């Protein structure tokens, strides 16, 4: 498990290389966006429209953090996600083990 | 693969949410969450980070692991549902990656279809070798999940041109991308089978 945690930390730290830097270099689109573009082109008009920015509720949309450059926001986002799973682990696994151990 | 808000009409969104909840109850009854929760959370965390590692492809798209087949091979298809559910809920609620109205459809594609297809294909082909079985399982999981996404989009009244356009485009596109999913799935399964076989259920 310790190895996995180390691996996840390393992956989180290098994630902007793939998710930000290379994405900006090549021109990143989700595969579904590309398929939607094909569909829109085949249909001759925009029939599939992403409205996520019109109804957004989170400051961390697209793995960004307000006030931080994209690369730093991407790393912080990765750790936010990992922190959520860590908290869940503490609540659902570690705490239960401790309770069982006490009993 | 993450369908954003706006691609499905309210009825399709409601139906897919209901299907997700219904299957979720069935998966809950057929899984052992209390026993496997540690592995489920570990896989969810790993897949969450792995999905942030986009591999851009010249031409303007990118690839990342979905992990449906991999999860199913490691923990079985019903526990894999909860792995992908945890990934998709965090992505949708915290990062708005994938819509909230389309969460049901996304969970069906990546948490139900991909693991079930990956599981069945891997089980059927395992006798020919783990690497090739996992490779085909990963590829098939993405291809069929892409087909399912095309079906959902095509059947939604928000998309007036129907499945004749949406399904072939989505299926063919994801069949190409699925090769990388298959390769990553195969490498991880073979590595874990050798180094930590206790984590590989199948």
Image (cartoon, coloured by chain):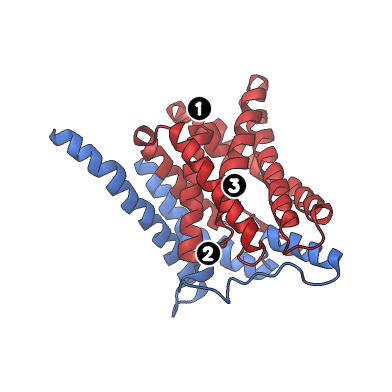
Identity of the residue drawn at 46% across and 47% down: B44
Mark 1 surroundings within 10 Å by alpha-carbon count, few (fewer than 14), some (14 through 19), many (20 or more): few
Identity of the residue drawn at 50% across and 47% down: B21
Identity of the residue drawn at 69% across and 68% down: A27
Residue A27 visible in image: yes
Residue at the spot of label 2: A16
Q: Are marks 3 and 1 in contact (CB under 8 Å)?
A: no
In this rendering, the answer to whether A53 lies above or below B16 is below
Q: Position of residue A44 (x, y in %)?
A: 86, 70
Quadrant of residue B188 in the image?
top right
The residue lying toward the viewer, choosing from B8 and B146, is B8
Residue at the spot of label 1: B194
The chain drawn in blue is A
Q: Position of residue B51 (x, y in %)?
A: 55, 54
The residue lying toward the viewer, choosing from B66 and B145, is B145
Q: Chain of mark 1?
A: B
Residue at the spot of label 3: B108
Q: Tell me what hue chain B is rendered in.
A: red
Residue B191 visible in image: no
Q: Are marks 1 and 2 in contact (CB under 8 Å)?
A: no
Identity of the residue drawn at 59% across and 68% down: A21
User: Marks 3/2: CA distance?
Assistant: 29 Å
User: Marks 3/1: CA distance?
Assistant: 31 Å
In this rendering, the answer to whether A14 lies above or below B199 is below
Q: Secondary structure at mark 1?
A: helix
Mark 2 surroundings within 10 Å by alpha-carbon count, few (fewer than 14), some (14 through 19), many (20 or more): many
Q: Secondary structure at mark 2?
A: helix
Nearer the observer, disc 3 or disc 2? 3
């Amino acid at each position: 498990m310790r190895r996995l945690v180390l691996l996840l930390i390393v992956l989180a730290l290098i994630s902007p290389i793939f998710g930000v830097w290379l994405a900006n270099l090549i021109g990143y689109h989700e595969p579904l966006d590309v398929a939607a573009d094909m569909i829109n082109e085949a249909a001759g008009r925009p029939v599939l429209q992403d409205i996520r920015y019109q109804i957004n509720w989170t400051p961390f949309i697209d793995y960004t953090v307000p006030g931080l450059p994209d690369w730093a926001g991407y790393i912080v986002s990765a750790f936010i996600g990992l922190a959520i799973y860590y908290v869940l682990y503490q609540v659902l696994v570690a705490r239960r083990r401790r309770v069982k151990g006490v009993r | 693969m993450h369908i954003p808000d706006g691609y499905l009409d309210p009825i399709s969104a409601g139906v897919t949410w209901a299907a997700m909840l219904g299957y979720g109850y069935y998966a809950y009854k057929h899984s052992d969450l209390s026993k496997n929760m540690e592995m489920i959370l570990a896989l969810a965390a790993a897949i969450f980070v792995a999905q942030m590692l986009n591999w851009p492809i010249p031409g303007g798209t990118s690839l990342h692991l979905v992990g449906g087949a991999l999860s199913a091979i490691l923990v079985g298809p019903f526990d894999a549902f909860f792995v992908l559910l945890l990934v998709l809920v965090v992505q949708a609620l915290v990062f708005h990656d994938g819509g909230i109205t389309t969460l049901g459809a996304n969970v069906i594609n990546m948490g139900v279809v991909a693991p079930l297809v990956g599981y069945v294909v891997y089980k059927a082909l395992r006798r020919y070798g783990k690497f090739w079985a996992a490779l085909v399982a990963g590829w098939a999981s993405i291809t069929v999940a892409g087909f399912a996404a095309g079906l959902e989009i095509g059947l939604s009244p928000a998309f007036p041109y129907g499945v004749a356009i949406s399904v072939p485009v989505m299926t063919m596109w994801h069949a190409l991308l699925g090769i990388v999913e298959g390769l990553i799935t195969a490498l991880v399964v073979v590595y874990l089978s050798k180094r930590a076989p206790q984590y590989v259920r199948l």
